[in-house]
C-alpha cells in the first residue's frame, strides 16, 4: 500500500490469561502473574517506541480484588517488587505515569508508591502510561454522576468525560484483549464508544512485541466512520 501507517494515538490493553499460562505449565497462578509483569514492562516500552502517545494497561479490576486472598496478596507483592523499577524506566523515557482506579481498595503503602511514581514522572512529555488498578468502569461512571449531582449542574458528554479518571486523555483508538475472551470486563465503558476492538487468543505472558505490531497493522487497515458515511 505504501504511505504512512496510521498509528493509534491511544492503545489500551486488557492483559488477560496469566493464570491459564501458569496452569499450562503446572505452575502456581502467581508465576503467571510474574511472567505477565515482565511482559508488561517490555511491552509498554515497545508501545511508545511504536509512536503511540497514550497507553492504558488494565492490570487489576476492582472485581479481581475478590479473588482468594493468597492471589491478591501475590499481586500486591509483585507490585511492590517491580513498581519502582518501572517508574525509573518511565522517567528515563520521558513518559508520565497516571494510575486510575479506586485507591481506597488498595493497601496504604501501595497508594504511597503510586503517588510517588506519579509525582516523579509528572513532567514526562513523550507520552502517558495509564495503569488501571482496582479499576471498574461502572464505579468510575457512578462516581462521575455523583460529582455532577454534587456540583448541582447538568453536564454534556464532554463535561461528563472531564469528571472521569481519564479527564484530559483522548479516548482509546484501539483496545486489545489477550487471553481468548471476547469481552470488556468493566474496562473503559464510556471511553470505548468508538474504539476499535482487537481480540487475540495469545495468553498475556506470550503476547510478544511482534503480536503488538500485528494488532497495530490490523488497526491501520480499519475504516473508522464515527457514525458518518
Ligand atoms: C489477568 O490474568 C491478570 C489479572 C486479572 C490480575 P488472569 O489472572 O485473569 O488469568 P486467567 O484469565 O485466569 O488465565
Ligand atoms: C479482566 O480480566 C481484568 C484484567 C485483565 C485486569 P478478568 O480475568 O478479570 O476478566 P473475566 O473475569 O474473565 O471477565
Ligand atoms: Mg482472566
Image (cartoon, rainbow, N blue to C red):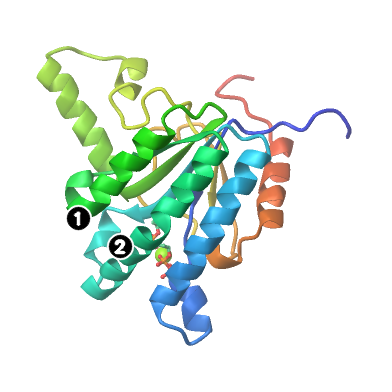
Q: Is mark 2 on a helix, strand or loop?
A: helix
Res. 107 mark? 1
What residue sits 59% from the left and 64% below the top?
201
Q: Which of 131 and 41 is in front in this view?
A: 41
Give the position of the C terminus as an image quadrant: top right
* Residue depicted at x 51% and y 69%: 35
In percent of width and height, residue 208 lies at 65, 60
Mark 2 crowdedness (10 Å alpha carbons): few <14, some 14-19, many ≥20: few
Give yes or no for contact between labels 2 and 1 (Cβ–Cβ under 8 Å): yes
Name the residue rendered at 61%, 61% in the picture. 207
**Residue 83 at least partly seen:** yes
Classify mark 2 as within 8 Å of ligand 1 or not, answering yes or no. Answer: no
Q: Residue 76 carries which label?
A: 2
Instruction: Give residue 34's position: percent from left, percent from top.
Output: 46, 69
Q: Where on the image, by quarter, is ligand 3?
A: bottom left
Placement of 202 over or under 156, stated as above or below: below
Amino acid at each position: 500500500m505504501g504511505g504512512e501507517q496510521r498509528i493509534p494515538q491511544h492503545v489500551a490493553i486488557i492483559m488477560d490469561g496469566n493464570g491459564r499460562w501458569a496452569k499450562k505449565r503446572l505452575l502456581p497462578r502467581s508465576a503467571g502473574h510474574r511472567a505477565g509483569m515482565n511482559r508488561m514492562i517490555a511491552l509498554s516500552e515497545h508501545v511508545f517506541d511504536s509512536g503511540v502517545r497514550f497507553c492504558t494497561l488494565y492490570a487489576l479490576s476492582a472485581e479481581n480484588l475478590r479473588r482468594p486472598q493468597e492471589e491478591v496478596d501475590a499481586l500486591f507483592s509483585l507490585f511492590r517488587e517491580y513498581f519502582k523499577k518501572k517508574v525509573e524506566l518511565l522517567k528515563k523515557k520521558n513518559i508520565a505515569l497516571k494510575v486510575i482506579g479506586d485507591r481506597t481498595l488498595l493497601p496504604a503503602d501501595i497508594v504511597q508508591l503510586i503517588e510517588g511514581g506519579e509525582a516523579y514522572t509528572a513532567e514526562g512529555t513523550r507520552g502517558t502510561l495509564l495503569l488501571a488498578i482496582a479499576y471498574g468502569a461502572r464505579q468510575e461512571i457512578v462516581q462521575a454522576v455523583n460529582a455532577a449531582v454534587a456540583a448541582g449542574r447538568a453536564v454534556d458528554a464532554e463535561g461528563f468525560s472531564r469528571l472521569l479518571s481519564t479527564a484530559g486523555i483522548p479516548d482509546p483508538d484501539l483496545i486489545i484483549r489477550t487471553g481468548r475472551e471476547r469481552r470488556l470486563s468493566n474496562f473503559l465503558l464510556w471511553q470505548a464508544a468508538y474504539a476499535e476492538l482487537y481480540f487475540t487468543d495469545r495468553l498475556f505472558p506470550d503476547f510478544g512485541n511482534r503480536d503488538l505490531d500485528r494488532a497495530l497493522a490490523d488497526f491501520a487497515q480499519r475504516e473508522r466512520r464515527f457514525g458518518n458515511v
